[in-house]
Amino acid sequence: MERNRIQESANSRASLFDVVHLGGRSVTGLPYTERRGLLEGLGLAGPAWSTPGTIVGHGAQAWEAARESGLEVLLAKRLTSRYEPGARSKAWLKIQIHHLADVVIGGWIPGRGRLNGLPGAVLVGERREGLLHYAGSVGTGWSETERPRLAGLLRIAAAEACPFAEVPPVAGARWVLPRLVGEVRYSTRTRTGRLRHPSWHRLRPDLAPDDLT
């Protein structure tokens, strides 16, 4: 299994997973284990590229290691698989890794169309050193009943001032008192610590914002 952290920066390191042509000949017909051996033998590593490590077998161990490392994707390949140019091979599986985070709601953005009067997205933050730092916008994951319920809670908690340490660059935001705690799923974090691809999981009425410091 291969592990890869997908970076958001243009200067991030590219990950080299396979080799398909070497020494003037195609190696696509070789089993993956042989191609991987050729790739590792090249010793390709530099300021902008690297060859990620692999774990042979031990799928549960690979999953746990990738999750704990904050990686976004786990790529599983059958050891006997050939390289199939232009095809989505059933012998390769790209497994998305989701993480959970408890966040504090600090604002919301009104929805449009059928979501008129309801939150189209909530603006969430995480507490560090006594301050609420903006962590991202969450606009997916609610059921048909959860969104109206959340709308009522947001109206009750309405506030004039932005509760975040720095005002998020979000147009049309409405602020709330930072009282509501929710749990969100996300793929990984940006270099500045914000959540990538967050989606709503559930409210956490059992937690208070101060519990997250």
Image (cartoon, rainbow, N blue to C red):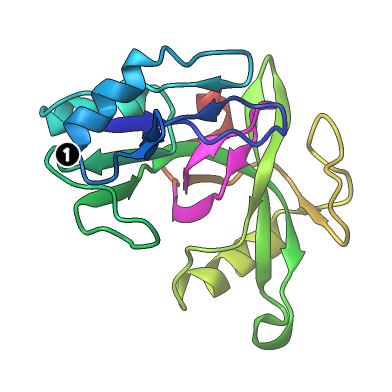
Query: Which secondary structure dominates the residues rendered in magenta?
Result: strand
SS type, badge 1: loop
Give left or right: position of 173 versus 59.
right
Q: Is residue 182 magenta?
A: no
In the rendered image, the quadrant that contains the C terminus is top right
Tag count: 1
Residue 149 percent coordinates (x, y): 53, 69
Residue shown at 51%/36% (left/top)? Answer: 188
- For this rendering, which residue is in front, 4 or 33? 33
Q: Is residue 195 magenta?
A: yes
In the image, what residue type sits under mark 1?
Pro
- For this rendering, which residue is in front, 117 or 89? 89
Residue 82 percent coordinates (x, y): 21, 47
Above or below, 65 relative to 29? above
Give left or right: position of 54 versus 135.
left
- For this rendering, which residue is in front, 74 or 166? 74
Residue 110 percent coordinates (x, y): 75, 70
Q: Which residue is mark 1?
A: 31
Query: Can residue 146 be spotted in the picture?
Result: yes
Above or below, 77 relative to 37? below
Residue shown at 39%/43% (left/top)? Answer: 98
Magenta stretch bounds = 184-203
In the rendered image, the quadrant that contains the N terminus is top left
